[in-house]
Amino acid sequence: MSRMKKLLEKFLSNPEGVKYKELDKILIYLGFVIVSAKGSHKKYKHQNFSSDIIVPVHNNECKNFYKKETHKKIKDLIKKS
């Protein structure tokens, strides 16, 4: 199993245990692209979603609430695949 797949499994089992940098790698691995970054907010877009994921980053970390919301989107993406 590749390192990214292990990281994705870790995130799917416990989204709060992942750092922002790892979350960023996961999103890019799954096909999300950063469409804008203003101040402390990064916006990720995926071709299969009409809405974007916005993640505020402070001190190289994001709050668990945003990790949980991203977790829901990723689970939806995996179900669609």
Image: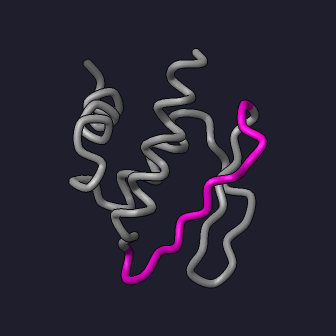
Residue at position x 73%, y 48% in the image: 51
Q: Which residues are magenta?
A: 48-60
Q: Quadrant of the C terminus?
A: top right
Residue 7: name its quadrant: top left
Residue 36: x and y, percent?
73, 66
Judged left or right of residue 69, residue 14 is left
Judged left or right of residue 65, residue 79 is right
Residue at position x 47%, y 52% in the image: 69
Residue at position x 62%, y 54% in the image: 53
The secondary structure making up most of the magenta span is loop
Total numbered labels placed on residues in the image = 0
The foreground one among 5 and 15 is 15
Residue at position x 61%, y 62% in the image: 54
Magenta includes 57? Answer: yes
Vertical placement of residue 10 versus 65, above or below: above
Q: Quadrant of the N terminus?
A: top left
